[in-house]
Image (tube, grey):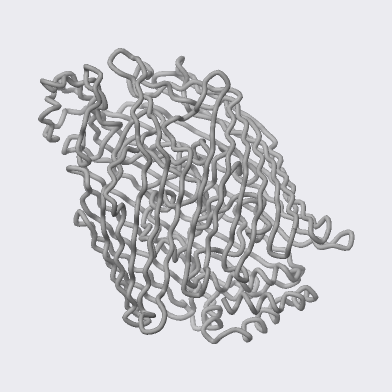
Amino acid sequence: MRQRFCARQCASWLLLSVASASPLWVQAQTSDSAEAASAASKKPAHKPTVKGKAGPRTLEQVKVEGQTSSTYSSDDTTAATRLQLSLLDTPQSVSIISRQRMADQQLNSVRQVLDNTTGVESNSYDTERVVYWSRGFQIENMAYDGVPVAAGLNVGSVDGSLDTSIYDRVEVVRGATGLLSGSGSPSAEINFVRKQADSKTPQLDVSVSYGKWATKRMTIDGSTALNKSGTVRGRMVITHEDGNSFMDRYRNNKNVLYGVVDWDVTPNTLLSVGYEYQRSMPRGVTWGSFPILYADGGQISLPQSFNPSARWTYWNNMTQSAFIDLKHQFANGWQIHGEVDHRKTNADSDLFYLYGFPSRSTGAGLDPYVYKSYQSGRQNMFDLYASGPVHAFGRDHELVGGVYTSDYATDSYYYPSESDLSAIDFNNWNGDYPYPDFSSQKQMVTLTHIKQEGAYLAARIQLADPLKLVVGGRYTRWSNNTNDATYGVYNETKGKVVPYAGLIYNILPDLTAFASYTKIFDPQTYRGSNGAFLEPMVGTSTEVGLKSRNFNGALNTSLTFFNTRESNVAEAVPGEYLADGITQVYQPLNGTRSRGFEFESTGAITDNWNASFGISHYNIKAPGYGDVHPSLPRATVRSFTTYRLPGAWRNLTVGGGLNWQNAVNIPVADINGATREIHQSSVMLLSLMARYNFNDRMSLQVNGDNLLHKKYFIADDSSDLAFGPPASFMVTFNYKFF
């Protein structure tokens, strides 16, 4: 807080200095407390050297030094436009889930993070395939450190199984993000910012957790200098988690390894090399929904722990990625940034599914289906851009331009079953089902190769003292070559120019109004009734709103109104599948319109009080069809706060939050193919936490979730239902060795 205040005082002085930012940084640092100076000294040497940058840019660099404290917010981001803009000057809705927020709520998976993010909701086809939505559209775009990567292997959305222990923060840019991602829906992009080796002195944090259903978790996070001068630094994160679940027979085992080396090649050049490994090995997994209706049309009442899967099922997933990242800062304020990433994913599974409509009295009427599969994915990415200040017409502006390429391939195979499957008694189902005989020879399902190439250019133009224009565009060339065992060979190439424009007007120094516009281009892999892929979604998205910085920038608040128009929006047809009996049939909807608002306030209210509150509401409809994706809640609230008590209780921090969503009616098909509706009442989930710091090194924390013990459904776009988890707790012991 004091550092931000100093930065504000020095702003007018900084504006006069554009030639030597390093001395400015030193002077700003020495005017702060010794504690903040110590923290800042752990940053890589290249970061404070921002020679030639205009004053506001240096000001933002000073603020970033305080980001690793107990804040829930951040001062700037490049996630929306690649331009280093403050949240106040970013003409889109941006949420940032900081490392402190993740620690306070024990948000240890990507799904937990996104389920607590304003304007985002999730549902799932089964235990392993999670789908995320924003503004009524599926979230397909994700990025590592700003570089777009392919969505999850098993479903075309963000990989919710990823562990968050390796991330410094998660940035969520809602709305269309075609300027950086190229293709993608007008929902959101999730940017995962990895931890860096930013400490010249040894640091080692160890946390051990134990929770309900015998969940055990341990994380070791260590970093140190690798040479005497501290210009080469290393960091490693190791996480292991295993435990059971509220679902019968379901358990998971997860291992994470992450390592990064940062090298200050020169005072202005940083080279980072890193590797990530994540593997989850769940057992007793589900595949699709449990039966919903009896043969007589009545709804089946099931316990929250019900698991329709057989005991022998599993679904192993592994993600590996390696990256090389190079940044160089020139003396004139320009910088160049290049990154190369290689990512591999694979999954193998033995799956079991029950489908049909059981008899209420006998339990007969369900047919089992088994499936053994193997999938692998490979992606190579290259991203290169340059950015810097431009002085023209008596004003300072900023320009960024870059290129991006991605080559992504997935192979999917299955092993045919050679067993005669016996019927089951649903009324006495306990997961005991004989393991089937699968062929030892795999057969091809699909071979897919998707390439994307793009070039983008954006500028922040200072039109007048209170008025800025952010304008840019991207050309994207996308190709899909798919060989499908059932539907044959599919080849398609598309090229598209995606424009972007935003206006920001400073009503007051810490209050802005903004408006933005972009086009949408989203190739799809959903199939219609004839088995062919649907045409790409195309449309436009506009946003207007207000943003403010409060308490010297500690608290960021935004109010956004959005309007999105789309054609070829994929909508699942309830109960209709292709000839394989697995692939959901979709229909394209034209003239689809989503409009609504989002409000969010996140950050520090005082030095001891952090808070995040967000509310979102939207409606999405198509002419002649009505509500699109009716199983998705239209209104959500996401909130959480922590407070460190004063005086004699200063070692105790308490907190809590409420998540809420409105009631929905979920369409399902009955035994005759007619559409029925399952009502899900509104859902309110209460969470609480408390942490006691015994000293500067040792703390004990308790978290409780869904403490009202709400029993509720989560429904996906194909009318699959799953139960949300009941009340749970986790106790975490953390120790900092140095």
Q: Is residue 259 left or right of residue 142?
A: left
| Residue 487 on image: x %, y % | 43, 18
Q: Residue at x 14, y 35 (%)?
A: 431
Of 736 and 643, nearer the camera is 643
Q: Residue at x 62, y 51 (%)?
A: 80
Of 265 and 167, nearer the camera is 167
Q: Residue at x 54, y 87 (%)?
A: 34
| Residue 624 on image: x %, y % | 55, 18
Of 364 and 380, nearer the camera is 364
Quadrant of the drawing holding the N terminus: bottom right
| Residue 309 on image: x %, y % | 21, 34
Q: Is residue 213 left or right of residue 643?
A: left
Of 232 and 186, nearer the camera is 186
| Residue 508 on image: x %, y % | 73, 62
Count of numbered marks: 0
Q: Residue furthest right?
A: 393
Determine whether 102 is above or below 474 in the image: below
Quadrant of the drawing holding the C terminus: bottom left
Q: Is residue 15 left or right of residue 549?
A: right
Determine whether 532 is above or below 340 in the image: above
Does residue 377 appear in the picture of this structure? no
Q: Residue furthest top?
A: 672
Q: Hey, which quadrant is residue 157 in on the image?
A: top left
Does residue 476 appear in the picture of this structure? yes
